Image (tube, grey):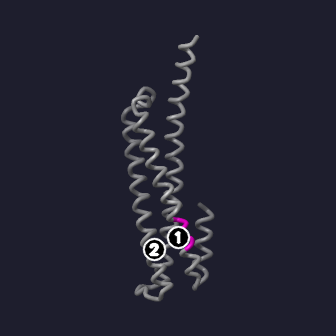
């Protein structure tokens, strides 16, 4: 996360380094595509293990967790769309067909980068929560299976 922010700050300081900004933004897009896939996987995990999770967790907490994962996935989709738009704008700037203020664009792109960094932090926290819950289910199931054979 810090690397993404430092790269952006370095790129914004260099006035005519649009190719580097394009590469950085392209990297953001790839990262967001991965996180979108990851959020989809978390949704599937929760859905597939919902009844087992319900044995160990509160129903309201599980529903809230599902909502939070859905909202994060929606935020990822929104950020991915913004990133694609920014990539198109950078191409227009490089081709000298961009009609808006390029410096203002760099500020907007920096804000997008900050939002992506916050999203990644939130997604990692969410992933940790879901994985811990699923891990608990697996460990408790294993104890039951061991008990059956004794």
Q: Which residue is depicted at the point 46% across and 49% down?
A: 39
Compared with 107, 116 (above or below) is: above
Name the quadrant of the N terminus: bottom right
The boundaries of the magenta stretch are 23-28
At label 1, counting other C-alpha atoms closer than 10 Å, the crowd grade (few under 14, some 14-19, many 20 or more) is many
Which residue is tagged 2?
86
**Which quadrant would residue 8 be assigned to in this image?**
bottom right
In front: 20, or 58? 20
> Horizontal and vertical percent for residue 109?
49, 73
Q: Which residue is depicted at the point 47% across and 89% down?
A: 96
At label 2, counting other C-alpha atoms closer than 10 Å, the crowd grade (few under 14, some 14-19, many 20 or more) is many
**Which quadrant would residue 81 be assigned to in this image?**
bottom left
First in sequence, mark 2 or 1: give its number. 1
Q: Which residue is depicted at the point 51% across and 41% down?
A: 129
> Horizontal and vertical percent for residue 138?
53, 29
Compared with 114, 52 (above or below) is: above
Q: Which residue is depicted at the point 57% across and 79% down?
A: 19
Q: Is residue 12 left or right of residue 66?
A: right
Compared with 124, 18 (above or below) is: below
């Amino acid at each position: 996360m810090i690397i993404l922010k430092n790269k952006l700050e370095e790129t914004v300081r260099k006035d005519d380094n649009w190719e580097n900004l394009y590469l950085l933004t392209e990297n953001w897009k790839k990262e967001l595509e991965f996180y979108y896939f990851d959020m989809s996987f978390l949704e599937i995990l929760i859905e597939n293990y919902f009844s087992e999770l319900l044995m160990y967790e509160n129903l309201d907490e599980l529903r809230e967790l599902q909502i939070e994962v859905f909202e994060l996935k929606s935020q990822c989709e929104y950020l991915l769309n913004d990133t694609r738009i920014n990539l198109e704008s950078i191409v227009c700037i490089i081709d000298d067909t961009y009609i808006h203020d390029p410096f203002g664009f760099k500020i907007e792109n920096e804000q997008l980068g900050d939002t992506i960094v916050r999203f990644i932090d939130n997604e990692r926290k969410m992933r940790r929560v879901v994985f811990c819950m699923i891990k608990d289910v697996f460990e408790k199931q294993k104890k039951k299976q061991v008990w059956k054979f004794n």
